[in-house]
Amino acid sequence: MKFFIKNSLLREEKTDCIVIGIFEFCEFTCANNCFNESVLSYINNFIKKGDIQGKIGQTLLLYNIPNIVSERILLVGCGKKDSLNRYDLSKIVEKSMRILNKFSIKNILFSLMEINIENCDIYWSIRTMVNAINKYFYKNFKINTSLEKDIYLYSISFHIMEKKYFHIANNALKHALAINSGITAAKKLGNLPPNICNPLYLFLQAQKLSEKYKGKIDVTSIDIKEMHDLGMNAYVAVGSGSKNKPYMSVIKYSGKNTIKQEKVIVLIGKGLTFDSGGISIKPSKNMNEMKYDMCGAAAVYGTLIVAAKLNLPLTIIGILAGCENMPGGNAFRPGDILTTMSGKTVEILNTDAEGRLVLCDVLTFIKRFSPDIVIDIATLTGACAVALGSHFSGLFSNDEKLAYDLEKSSQQTNDKIWRLPLSSEYEKELNSSFADFSNVGKGKAGAITAACFLSQFSKEYTWAHLDIAGTAWESGNNQGATGRPVELLSQFLLNESNFF
């Protein structure tokens, strides 16, 4: 499917269908400026009959409209004028796609750019619409099956009224398509079953990036032998009960010909390809969803794809911290004391608090890159999902500017985050009688104590931690990876590179 920006006379557009908005009280979004009286009179006949009232999501498909070249017009309700937000725009586009995909329509032209959306200009309108279209079509696919729903569409175009916005619109389209490629890649990786997607598989997928984006991306791996040699004992311990041994993928993306290349940004993704809880085994109910415990790694993987597609003028190190946490004769136990790569010791009280053990060694490992910014992304704690639900990811940071920049990116993309405290009062929850600290707190504020644990290994960095346990996947009838927070991270990188 191809996407285009068009600036033309709607009545002369030869396409299968033009999508036009109509507000409540039967006011067109743009048609008064685009069509002559005979066209408007023809359409108004249907409106007067009450076939459409303009409420959000209502549609009316018209054929053989006089004095226009397009075969069809789809009227879509846009609700009350000047009261729409981006969520409403997504619903409008999704409903339009649901209707049009039932027909053998190959080419669609959306003429919705003139709708006044709250905090949303042409750039963000196009980003929002492309997101909605890609989200709709991703739902139609299942993994490893030929029973995919037919898609007839060849092209989708977005009509802009004024030529002066053509460059901005094309830029928005370029960014949207790249970001949605990253989101789709993260979803596909996250949705794979754990018998396919194991730590080695993560590395093999990362390796393919170096082949596809040769000259931009280099990939190396750290296997279990090298982890032992480096003293990454906490990371190794988590994977010790599984036949699928730990594999850490190191993806280096290098932007070319820019002073921004001096700045090094490290993105660390927790990649627990399956988390049984280990000896502290989880309840069996919904344990199948623990294949999503690698969605942090999937998000980093997707974000690196976006950077490569957009040729961002940055240096980015992406870490996919692949591991599998299983019970077994070699598994680590509650009561064990581990010496981390940093030299600090950790008493294990719960083997299901494993992600922080993997990440703490990775946070030490990345010292070699002298990073300016470090962000880890992890499905780290059920406590964060309890605190924030499925709408907001948790944000923790030791730097005000980095926290502000991530919150700005969140507001721009509507990929929501909420900052939680990271203060010394919570650190005493990790006190241990036998080691420097324990791997879990005393039972309260679990998301915060987990972040406090990680903060012990990131004091030398400008660092942020995103806990995506509540947002990385959906349960129930719509079960599947969400691809979050790829758009948030991509926007952060766009802002860092001033790439607008």
Image (spheres, rainbow, N blue to C red):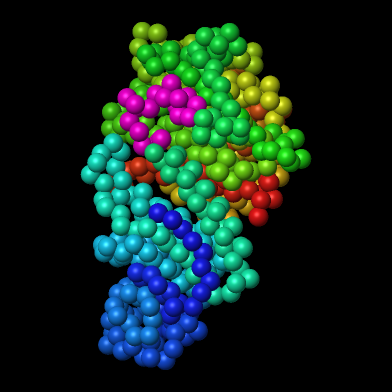
Q: Main secondary structure of the magenta part?
A: helix
Q: What stretch is highlighted in magenta?
A: 189-208
- Classify residue 163 as left or right of residue 384: right
In the rendered image, residue 239, in percent from the top left (x then y), is placed at 44, 16
Nearer-the-camera pick, 448 or 98? 98
Q: How many marks?
A: 0
Question: Which quarter of the figure is the C terminus placed in?
Answer: bottom right
Residue 161 placement: quadrant = bottom right
Q: What residue lies at 44% left-to-right and 78% top-to-bottom?
A: 12
Given the current orientation, which residue lies at the most extreme left position?
147
Seen in the picture, residue 232 relative to 470 is either above or below; the reply is: above
Q: Nearest the camera: 315 or 150?
A: 150
Q: Residue at x 31, y 89 (%)?
A: 45
Picture coordinates of residue 156, whole percent (x, y): 42, 62
Tell me what residue is drawn at x 41 percent, y 57 percent: 133
Q: Is residue 308 left or right of residue 373?
A: left
The answer to whether residue 196 of the structure is visible from this angle is: yes
Return the x and y of residue 487 as percentages of the image width and height. Answer: 53, 47
| Residue drawn at (40%, 60%) of the image | 155
Kindly indicate the quadrant of the structure image that contains residue 351: top left
In x, y percent, where is residue 339? 58, 11
Instruction: Give yes or no for residue 330 being in the magenta stretch.
Output: no
Quarter placement of the N terminus: bottom left
User: Is residue 398 toward the left or the right of residue 132 in the image?
Assistant: right
Residue 296 shows up from this direction:
no
Residue 181 vertical placement versus 376 (above, below):
below
Task: Tell me the quarter of the picture where residue 95 sits.
Answer: bottom left
Q: Establish if 99 lies above or below 281.
A: below
Horizontal arrangement in the rendering, residue 324 relative to residue 165 (left or right): left
